[in-house]
Image (tube, rainbow, N blue to C red):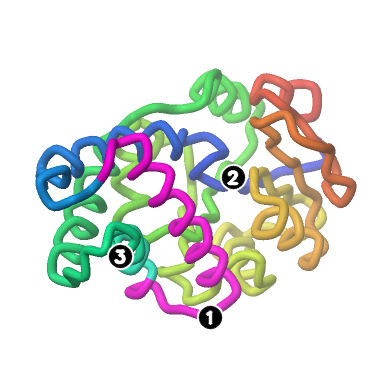
Amino acid sequence: MKYKHIFFDLDHTIWDFETNSSLTLKIMYEEFDLPSKGVGPFAEFHAIYREHNQKLWDRYSKGFIKQDELRWKRMWHTLLDYKIGDEKLAKAISLRYLEVLPDQKELFPYTKEILQYLLNKKYKLHIVSNGFEEVQHNKLRNSGLTNYFTEIVTSEGCNYVKPQKEIFEYAMNKAGAMLNESIMIGDNEEADILGAVNTGMDSVFMNHINGDKNEQATYTIHHLKELEGIL
């Protein structure tokens, strides 16, 4: 085998973040009775939150804001769009969101099948995620994924953020992996693919949304089953 160690991103790659986040936000919307506070229809609220979440994750990955800011300011900015300047409410919803989110279990099709296939072929599987330490471990456990992976590395746990090459080097060191026997699989063209390129690691662009092929990635796939043709 060319590779021995496979490093997976978690959210949007094998754990269906958009579906799970939507389910969680719906619970928040009802639990905190947000319509009574002036928040519009759920679909609108969800779209506004997603926009702020994406912007703040981008700023976090570039080192412009800290994790604590990301955790609650995405909800704070969402509420501000409804002219609700309640910081205490934003922080309460954000805390509850992170408690409930890991309970959701939606995975992309063929996730467990491909992980078992790779284990059967004697690959060592690992997670490299920009997510929060406790939250990511809870997602893996509640989705029944923990036992597939040898090492689980998060940005919070190692103080580096993808696409910084240091997080990839940290993960390889923790896994006892050499660069030429490692490959990164992820959906994010900057964090996962550019990060792998900058590290000198081969990569697979997990293009669930059927967008353009990533020219920097070693491989591009649109379904997890396609990994069987690569690995």
Q: Which image quadrant for residue 73?
A: bottom left
Please tell me whether mark 1 sits on a helix, a strand or a loop: loop
Query: Looking at the rendering, which quadrant does residue 104 occupy?
Result: top left
Q: Looking at the picture, which amino acid does disc 1 mark?
A: Phe
Task: Report the side of 86 relative to 196 (left or right).
Answer: left
**Residue named by callout 2:** 8
Question: What amino acid type is highlighted by mark number 3?
Answer: Leu
Q: Which mark is nearer the camera, 1 or 2?
A: 1
Q: Judge by depth and name the residue closer to the eye, 208 or 154.
A: 208
* Residue 119: assigned label: none
Q: Are marks 1 and 2 in contact (CB under 8 Å)?
A: no
Which residue position is annotated with label 3?
80
Please give the range of residues in magenta: 40-69
| Magenta stretch contains residue 186 | no
Q: Amino acid at mark 2?
A: Phe
| Label 2 Cα neighbours within 10 Å, binned few <14 / some 14-19 / many ≥20 | many
- Mark 3 to mark 1: distance in Å? 21 Å
Residue, disc 1: 64
Left or right, 33 with respect to 218, comes to left
Q: Earlier in the sequence, mark 3 or mark 2?
A: 2
Q: Main secondary structure of the magenta part?
A: helix
Whole-percent x, y for residue 153 in the image? 48, 59
Q: Earlier in the sequence, mark 3 or mark 1?
A: 1
Residue extending farthest to the right is: 215
